[in-house]
Image (tube, rainbow, N blue to C red):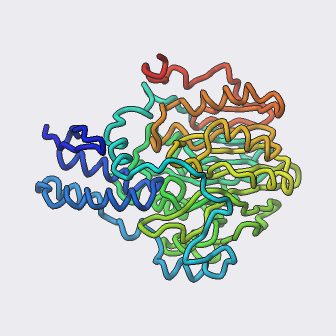
Amino acid sequence: MTATCLRSVTGQRHTVRGGVTGLVRTLGEVLLVNETSCAIRSVATSVLRTALLGATTAGMGLIAGATWGLPTALGASRRAVEAVTSVSPRWRDGAFHNTQPPTAGEPVSAPAMIYAMLTRGDRGRPAGEVPLTVPEHPTVADQLAVTWYGHASVLIEVDGRRVLVDPVWSERVSPSRLVGPKRMHPVPAEIEDLPPLDVVIISHDHYDHLDLRTVRRLLAHSGAPFVVPLGVGAHLRAWGVPADRVVELDWGGQARVRELTLTCTEARHFSGRGLTRDNTLWASWVITGPQHGVFFGGDTGYTPVFAEIGARYGPFNLTLLPIGAYGDAWPDIHMTPEEAVRAHGDLGGGLLVPIHWGTFNLGFHEWDEPVRRLLAAAGRDTENGARVAVPIPGERFTVLDPPPLHQRWWSGLTPAQARG
């Protein structure tokens, strides 16, 4: 096996196994996950271009396969997106913006970030096979039930209606089938096995939340409408979703689907599927039925706006909040588990179900660290009395009868170094 040597910002040399192929795959993760900054993607692009120039015939075959279908997966043109987004009062200087100012912190150089990606090894991966269960769905949707399919993909039953949020069924969260973060466990069940859906909700356009191949499979399986933030609908229409099945909303906008009211609410994040950033809106969602309320956080950093959402639309019987892929280098992008408990309290949440962990390796923490920290924080939160349920991927449960925490199905998958 050949190897490629890189030098870190400190001058230390590191060997990347697999030669050009290994280098392309690893740098592809930096480029394609879209959870890194534009500056990092720019540096990664330069390094990747250099690698490609010296690629072997086999390496060029990999590149051809990796880029197959890339333009379509990237989504709609900038012109098509801005035809919708530019009318928003939140749109200025060609982009959307978070309402909270960025958190001050020590900047992390792009080369250092790339080096960390190259050298993290198996950190962030489970020590064994993640258990799965195949969900059994009743003919009639429950009043309040949850099926977690992994990452942020959840089927929510609210007052007899079914809402599918951020569905991603592909093997990689990337515009490429060969490059980009890969699943650490299979999808528990196929899209074709889903029960009838009433609506599909998308939080934003990053690849781990909006997936071309999943959208096309849903089109063939379901006639449910898509309710999305401003600009995301342009991607859907470019992929063949009929315009009358797409509803785009700004923060504060509402749509009525059957007996459910869907409210597009603020999140603290960013967007982009290529080198253009923040030209579509990112959002959290409030799902309100005649009897129950649900908050879906999507992908977000902590923001005091959660308290405002709770005061206006809460309290909520159920909150689905992201807890993984956090890091000191991006405190405004992803909440820590402790911040998720705080947000749950701000929102007036009843049961907290963690999402955005365990399926794709998008950070630098151990695989089960997010859920361990979440439970520790919830146990300390005596003021709010946070209730938490951590389902196995594929597990369906009612909010009145959540899975017991003492089972701790994830504990056997804790990496040895994390166990100490």
Q: Residue furthest right?
A: 291
Residue at 48%, 78% in the rendered image: 78
354 vs 82, left or right, is right
82 vs 2, left or right, is right
Residue 207 in the image, given as x and y percentages of width and height: 48, 57
Q: Is residue 150 visible?
A: no
Name which quarter of the figure residue 200 lies in. Answer: bottom right
Q: Is residue 385 above or below residue 31?
A: above
Nearest the eye: 327 or 279: 327
Q: Is residue 49 above or below residue 326?
A: below
Nearest the eye: 293 or 274: 274
Residue 249 in the image, given as x and y percentages of width and height: 69, 70
Residue at 17%, 58% in the rendered image: 60
Residue 365 in the image, given as x and y percentages of width and height: 48, 34
Q: Is residue 65 above or below residue 417?
A: below
Q: The N terminus lies in which quarter of the figure?
A: top left
Residue at 39%, 51% in the rendered image: 109
Residue at 45%, 54% in the rendered image: 36
Nearest the eye: 220 or 229: 229
Q: Residue furthest top?
A: 420
Q: Is residue 296 above or below residue 15?
A: below
Name which quarter of the figure residue 70 lies in. Answer: bottom left
Residue 335 in the image, given as x and y percentages of width and height: 62, 44
